[in-house]
Amino acid sequence: MAKQYDVLFRLLILGDAGVGKTCLLCRFTDNEFHSSHISTIGVDFKMKTLKIDGINVRVQIWDTAGQERYQTITKQYYRRAQGIILVYDITSSHSFQHIVKWASDVDEFAPDKVQRILVGNKADEEQSRKVPKEQGNKLAKTYGMEFFETSACTNCNINESFTRLTELVLRAHKKELDAFQPFTNKTNKYIDMTSLEGERVKPDNDVNSQKACAC
Ligand SMILES: Nc1nc2c(ncn2[C@@H]2O[C@H](COP(=O)(O)OP(=O)(O)OP(=O)(O)O)[C@@H](O)[C@H]2O)c(=O)[nH]1
């Protein structure tokens, strides 16, 4: 069977419970939105293939539980990530203030090379907004991250934010990819960055993957 992608990356979505991590993922991968909140237990993941600069990039996107009690499990996934989306809810000042804690966890547990973006979700809820867009921008600048306001509900900036993070990851790993040059050869090989950067997981059998997508 012909190879269907050239490189595989792992992305991670972090943020407080209820900010919309699962909905962002479901919107991006399946173009679905669900209005109920079913808390993620541990972690769950979905896959999608993007074409960037002629390269077929497969992304394995891990959705993590925002609840404190799952942090021991979710932190184990940081070190295998090449890209991280830090999410807050624009209607929740608390979730925004908490980004500092999420970012410091990333500094502590993720690889140095990890690429990060900041996302303020629920941008459709303008009437309940607690976090001005400028504040999001300012915080992102402080951390040297790019910033997006999104709405999983109205499908605003979803593709843009996931695609941008994938572009940043691709750029950060350009040297390794150039050395391998899978895009020009005719073999069925692809680069699995997820196994190169850490211990390989077997998602199909992963005991932590307990939640079917609610969206
Ligand atoms: N208005 C609006 N509601 C949203 C949006 N994204 C998510 N929600 C709602 O926010 C609630 C929580 O969404 P989830 O995606 O389950 O939140 P989560 O961050 O995955 O939560 P945990 O799994 O507990 O960490 C649900 O009721 C969603 O419908 C959005 O863009 N706009």
Image (cartoon, helix red, strand yellow):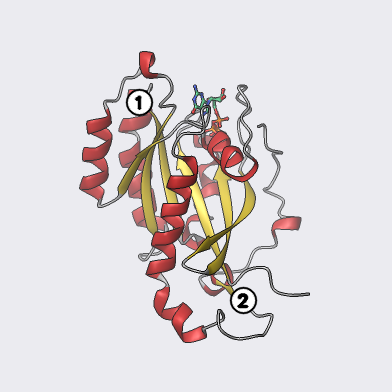
Give the distance between the C-alpha atoms of the residues marked 1 and 2, in whole angstroms: 42 Å
Q: Give the answer, above or below, for where 179 lies relative to 163.
A: below
Relative image position of residue 24 (x, y in whole percent): 53, 38
Considering only vertical position in the picture, is 69 above or below 44?
above
Q: Quarter of the image containing the C terminus?
A: top right
Instruction: Give the residue at the far front of this rendering.
Output: 54
Residue at 41% across / 57% down in the picture? Answer: 109
Q: Position of residue 171 (x, y in %)?
A: 39, 68
Q: Is residue 49 above or below residue 62?
A: below
Are there few (<14), some (14-19), or many (20+) residues within 10 Å of tag 2? many
Q: Amino acid at mark 2?
A: Tyr
- Number of numbered labels in the structure image: 2
Q: Earlier in the sequence, mark 1 or mark 2?
A: 1
Q: For marks 1 and 2, give the one nearer the viewer.
A: 2
Residue 190: image tag: 2
State the residue lying farthest toward the top: 127
Residue 152: numbered disc: none
Q: Give the side of residue 122 with respect to residue 191, left or right.
A: left
Q: Secondary structure at mark 1?
A: helix
Question: Residue under circle 1?
Answer: 94
Q: Quadrant of residue 129?
A: top left
